[in-house]
Amino acid sequence: MKKQWFTISVYSENNVGLLNRISGIFLKRHINIESLNVSKSEIDGVSKFTVVVFTTEDWTRKIVMQIEKQIEVIKAFYHTDEETIYQESALFKIASNLLFDERQIQNIIKESHAQIVTVSREFFVLAKTGKREEIDDMYQLLEPFGIMQFVRSGRIAVSKAEMRISTLLKEFEHK
Amino acid sequence: METLKAKHIKDNNKTTLRISGAEAIIHCLLAEGVDLIYGYPGGAIMPVYDELYKFQDRLTHVLTRHEQGAVHAAQGYARVSGRVGVAMATSGPGATNLVTGIADAQIDSTPVVCITGQVPRHLLGSDAFQETDIIGISTPVTKWNYQVTRASEIPEIMAKAFYIARSGRPGPVLIDITKNAQFDELDFSYEPCNAVRSYNPYPKPDPKAIDAAAALINSAKKPYIVYGQGVILGQAEEQLKALVEKAGIPAAWTILGLSAMDTDHPLNVGMVGMHGNYGPNILTNECDLLIAIGMRFDDRVTGDLNTYAKQARIIHFEIDPAEIDKNVKVDIAVLGNARDSLELLLPKIKKNSHKDWHDKFKEKYREEYDAVIKNDLQPTKAGLTMGEVVEAINKASGNKAVVVSDVGQHQMVTCRYARFKQTKSNITSGGLGTMGFALPAAIGAKMAAMDREVVAIIGDGGYQMNIQELATIFQNKTPVKIVVLNNDHLGMVRQWQELFFERRYASTVMTNPDFVKIAEGYHIKAKRVTKREELAATVEEMMQSPEAYFLEVKVEKEDNVFPMIPSGASVSDIRLK
């Protein structure tokens, strides 16, 4: 089976230790977590884990089943890139003098729709939100000038199809 | 089950009883109907032990000689009684010593609640004396775990622990309780837990899947059932028997499914797996429909997956959605408790006999009998075989004993030859293969079934992994019967070395102590059998003994267990020699 990118979305009770439990499921199977994000979800008190993996669909399905088996997990889903809207964010810290000495940098900022977050005497910070390739492209363009610091966030994603968490929780209340 | 005292608390407006966290733990246990726990005291759990002292008329604490013994005893208790077993230990080494048993309970789906003490909250993370991150350590091997740091959390968390341990696919739960939470007071009231909103323990069988399963079963020419522990845990023994009899389907057990059905039932055809019976393995690749009930296609059952039952349609009755298509892709999955699913299925099943198909199993049995079984059970050579000892135990117990086995050659022989009339009677470490399991598990098994004989069958290797529990047997006057099949080797590893490593017996030869003297040192009646003529009478004497009895049988040193599917080979390639 062919390997591809999958976004795993996990809705869970907000519980200390669950991250450890979930990451252990990947570790045990030697599946690398390419990116991980934990945040609140659209439901009060329910957390959302967004995990990106590059593996086969069969492994992804088995992992999702194991995640869903954990007591505090309400529901887990997996989607291909085509089935989600997804973004990542990145910050670039660059020496301020380059902004004046290298005209090309201003063009890169304009064309990549990046944002200048702050400028000080020593450095300025660019924020870029987009797909991984877009951030990679921007990195390639800026690298020759010297990047003081770089960081990229985990992927965040929403699915095109519905994730019926509220319905699930309502069903439970009526049990 | 509600206790009087708990009821009293409830009736008094729920807030009148102000007690310590430690006392609350005892009330929670009593409210869950627990009257027996296994454990070992230590600094961080002392407040709870102080309460155990006060409540000893209502809650018996059995002091094992090692925390591993405590958790295995709790497992043995749980497996025989069907109730939740409880083990208790202190922080640090006490907690880590539980881990093997917890892992064993996880892979064998045994309901166990482990309670560990922990350093006080303000010392957490300071590398305090006997501090260990048992939550982190136990996470991959528990169904659920939780660290309690405030006394007020105790009732809710304890209720949740018992509910999670016993519901759905059972498993171990560990509750780590900081010492301050044991000392601090709370307003105690207890509500049993009946649901956790993110947890669906009993998926409802899909009627469409049931219909599809029934259609396949009714049209199959060579249907074959493999049943596992899910039948026992789901209390589906009667339904399994009804299905087997109505549809005339030969059925084979996995190591943990054994005793779910009378071993003498004519349609109960034997054991599957690496050292299972010849027919049940070979015919897996000849059936046209494989019906898996409450089993999880372990690699020791399937052998090479690429050549496992490829010709057959497969139906999987299973409670755990994560097991579906995990190892073997199935045609129809019926999610749900085995009992619920089979009850829905039974009315849709047509009567049948499949006599020709069943005759194939008989034919294969005769081949196995001539090549293996005859020599195991009625040997003509000088040395004693493990099989004839198991057979002597069958005879002396009238197939009525609870048999607890350890791990290795003797375990395979036991699970092949022990006969059972009653469910929950075969207790062994299946998935994890934990040597040292049997002696403590037999203690728990006996305490769960004082009216039954409990016979532990153990190898000389595994026996010495928890031999200290002889002291627990002596102190509690637990009348278990202990049979050590001594071949002075780590027999199973030695067998592999003989077959696959050109007889290089690396670290498998054991120079053993005088086991009889050791048992006698613990004031346990003990005998050694070295000759065939002495066997039957001594086993009979052991069975008749009203107190604990230790029997060492010196068996042939280099016997092998056959049949055997070599590791990674197909079930079709099972060897008779």
Image: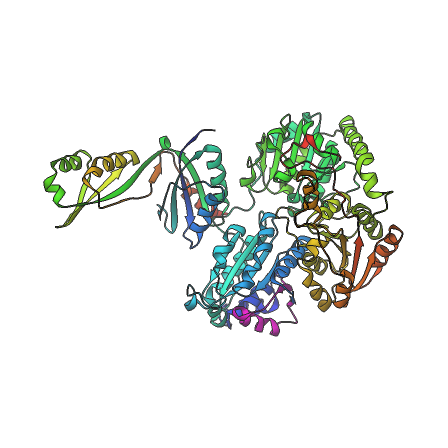
Foreground residue among A16 and B336? A16
Seen in the image, is B531 located left or right of residue A164?
right
Membership of B45 in magenta stretch: yes
Residue B516 x, y percent position in the rendering: 78, 62
Viewer-proximal residue, B127 or B398?
B127
* Residue A61 forms part of the magenta stretch: no
Residue B9: image location, x then y, percent: 54, 69
Q: Is residue B443 above or below residue A162?
A: below
Q: Nearer the viewer, residue A144 or B539?
A: A144
As drawn, B375 above or below B142: above
Q: Is residue B552 left or right of residue A132?
A: right
Q: Is residue B302 left or right of residue B47?
A: right
Residue B172 is at least partly visible in this image: yes
Q: Position of residue A131 (x, y in %)?
A: 29, 35
Q: Residue at x 61, y 73 (%)?
A: B53
Q: Please say if B105 is above or below B350.
A: below
Residue B34, by quadrant, is bottom right
Q: Which residues are magenta?
A: B34-61
Question: Percent from the top left, x then y, of residue B402?
Answer: 75, 53
Colour scheme of the rendered structure: rainbow
- Name the residue furthest right: B533
